[in-house]
Amino acid sequence: MKTIQKIDAKTPQFEKRKRVAAYARVSVEKGRTMHSLSAQVSYYSSYIQNNPEWAYVGVYSDGGISGTSTGARTEFQRMIADCEKGQIDIILTKSISRFARNTVDLLETVRHLREIGVEVRFEKENIRSLSGDGELMLSILASFAQEESRSISENIKWVIQKRYKQGLPNSKQNLYGYRWIGEELIVVPEEAENVKFIFDSYLNKISAEQTAKKLNEMGCKSFRGGRFGGPAVRAILLNITYTGTLHLQKEYIVDSITKKSKRNKGELPQYFVENHHEPIISMETWHAVTEERARRLSEGATSNWSLNTTCFTSKIKCGHCGKNFQRKQRKKIKSPYRYWCCATKNNKGKKYCQSCNIKEWQLEEISAEVLGLSKFDSDVFINKIKQISIQDHELIFLFKDGHSETRTYESHTSSRTPEWTREMRTQMSEFQKNKWRERRDKESNNNTSNDWQV
């Protein structure tokens, strides 16, 4: 028997419209205005929407941002994210230099977009990234664009260097105590008084943190209108601008592609423009603060009068991780005691440093023995001992005359050391029992209250 199978005619399907976006950027190096960016956005919006085969997604634009790195361009990054979400099929851009001047970034981005099916079209060069010779042409032309960017960057550096030699700053940044008005750096009287107070306090043996606290108590506001902190006070103490001197080229750009900056430590010339503006403090005060700061840094924490330090502070080094030992206190019922612990172990735990603690009385007894004293003397210790290294129950004393001596010690890891008497143990036991009874009674009362609510 014959069988008949009907095959329905296929309904002609309309080709899906391509979702098209554009990317525009103003060249910060060439000083283009935002009007140029607006013109690019307007052009691409009209161009895409007038094509019946395209669906308009939008125009992503970055204004006044260098094209040498894609990381700082927020709209560029948002466009790539939308591509990854499957919202864009084609990206239009004016030229390779508008898209990226870094060859590595350009090729990585284009390859990534090609993997997810997104095509980039460069109008000026007439290149389509999904075509057969697209990547080869991109590699060649992107190299030219990168070299152009490097050349522009070198020209800008030359202009900046010329300004420095003339005693002119590259930029005018306001700072606490001063404001730029035209070409002049003008003193702000109210803030200037606080600057003087900060320098005077430092020379009067007051720490940056204590000075900040005092300024806050006085109702003084920081440069941004907030509260003062130790770092802000230290930044003021380090700034030579308050002497009327302008310090130029404190930093420089390491790489024209990444725009990464680095502090100038002698790699390039530095310029000091004396008598550039009205000083707030004298150069003598500046030098005095600089010398005092150097002294405090060399002596470590012991030079800070605001800290509760001992003769051992900053002198005990961990043989495992190299960090200083810190003074800690363990409180017991009637016999609190102090001990010294590695900073790494104290802050991060035993996983990061396996050093052993040592009690302060042990340190004093062993130090007295090493110094040949019947009783520990902190003054003798300071005068003779340069450093103590602690590692695996060993104390290595390094003397200031160059020789060293080693001693061993016993570390009591248990919280209940031999110092605990029978009476103290009994008291602790009763304390724990009473604490348990209070907790049990509280839980019982809560349960009773819940029953009444039912």
Image: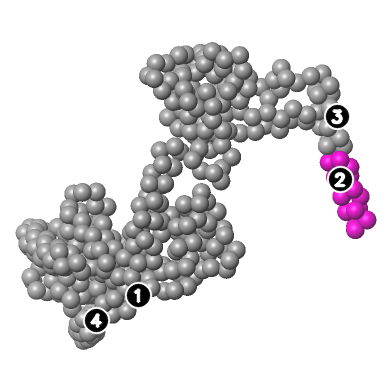
Above or below residue 262? Residue 297 is above
Q: Which quadrant would the N terminus be assigned to in this image?
A: bottom left
Foreground mark, 3 or 2, reads 3
Element under disc 4: helix
- Which residue does the image show at 71% across and 17% down from the upper left? 418
Give coordinates of residue 294: x percent, y percent: 38, 44
Q: Is residue 218 left or right of residue 29?
A: right
Tag 1 residue: 186
Real-space CA distance between mark 4 and mark 1, rounded to the nearest whole angstrom = 31 Å
Give coordinates of residue 119: x percent, y percent: 19, 66
Real-space CA distance between mark 4 and mark 3, rounded to the nearest whole angstrom = 78 Å
Give coordinates of residue 135: x percent, y percent: 11, 59
Above or below residue 13? Residue 149 is above
Real-space CA distance between mark 3 and mark 1, rounded to the nearest whole angstrom = 70 Å
Neighbours of disc 4 within 10 Å: few (<14), some (14-19), many (20+): some
Q: Earlier in the sequence, mark 2 or mark 4?
A: 4
Q: Nearer the viewer, residue 384 or 36?
A: 384
* Quadrant of residue 259 within the rendered picture: bottom left
- Which residue does the image show at 63% across and 22% down from the upper left? 361
Tag 4 residue: 34
Give coordinates of residue 449: x percent, y percent: 90, 53
Tag 2 residue: 442
State the extent of the magenta-drawn residues as a range: 438-454
Element under disc 2: helix
Real-space CA distance between mark 2 and mark 1, rounded to the nearest whole angstrom = 67 Å
For the residues labelled 2 and 1, say whether their Cβ atoms are less than 8 Å apart: no
For the residues labelled 3 and 2, say whether their Cβ atoms are less than 8 Å apart: no
Q: Earlier in the sequence, mark 4 or mark 3?
A: 4
Tag 3 residue: 430
| Dot 2 amino acid type | Lys
